[in-house]
Image (tube, rainbow, N blue to C red):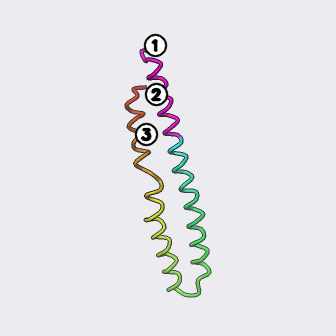
Amino acid sequence: MSELNGHTELQVFNAQYERENARERMQDAINTLNRAKEDLERYLANFDDAENDRERARQLNYAINYLVTNIQPNIRIDLLAHSQAELTRTGF
């Protein structure tokens, strides 16, 4: 294997792979947040259309539940952190 600036072709290939993987994971997080924004806007519309504060509180409860049960697990912070560690490890 040839060396490129002190790195083997395999190291260069692995570094490029980790960069692409990290970018895809960041894009996935953005997509998850965009979907969440749309869902939260529906809760807000329901809040605005509510006839009383009890119904408004219910819509807030739905929004809070959605954030806790859907956003945090689906954004995959663990994968973002893994990509960060792998990029640091590549040495580029």
Q: Which mark is residue 83?
A: 3
Q: Amino acid at mark 2?
A: Asn
Q: Residues within 10 Å of mark 3 (few under 14, many from 20)?
A: many
Residue under numbered circle 2 = 14
Image-based side of 28 in relation to 79, left or right: right
Image-based side of 41 in relation to 75, left or right: right
Q: Residues within 10 Å of mark 2 (few under 14, many from 20)?
A: some
N-terminal of the pair, mark 1 or mark 3, is 1
The structure residue drawn at horizontal position 59% and vertical position 87%, both measured from the top left corner, is: 51
**Vertical placement of 10 versus 21: above or below?**
above
Tell me where residue 74 appears, x and y as whole percent. Answer: 47, 56
Of the two numbered discs 2 and 3 in the rendering, the one whose residue sits closer to the viewer: 2
Residue under numbered circle 1 = 1
Disc 1 + disc 2, Cβ < 8 Å: no
Quadrant in the picture for residue 85? top left
Spatial CA span between label 2 and label 3: 12 Å
Q: Residues within 10 Å of mark 1 (few under 14, many from 20)?
A: few
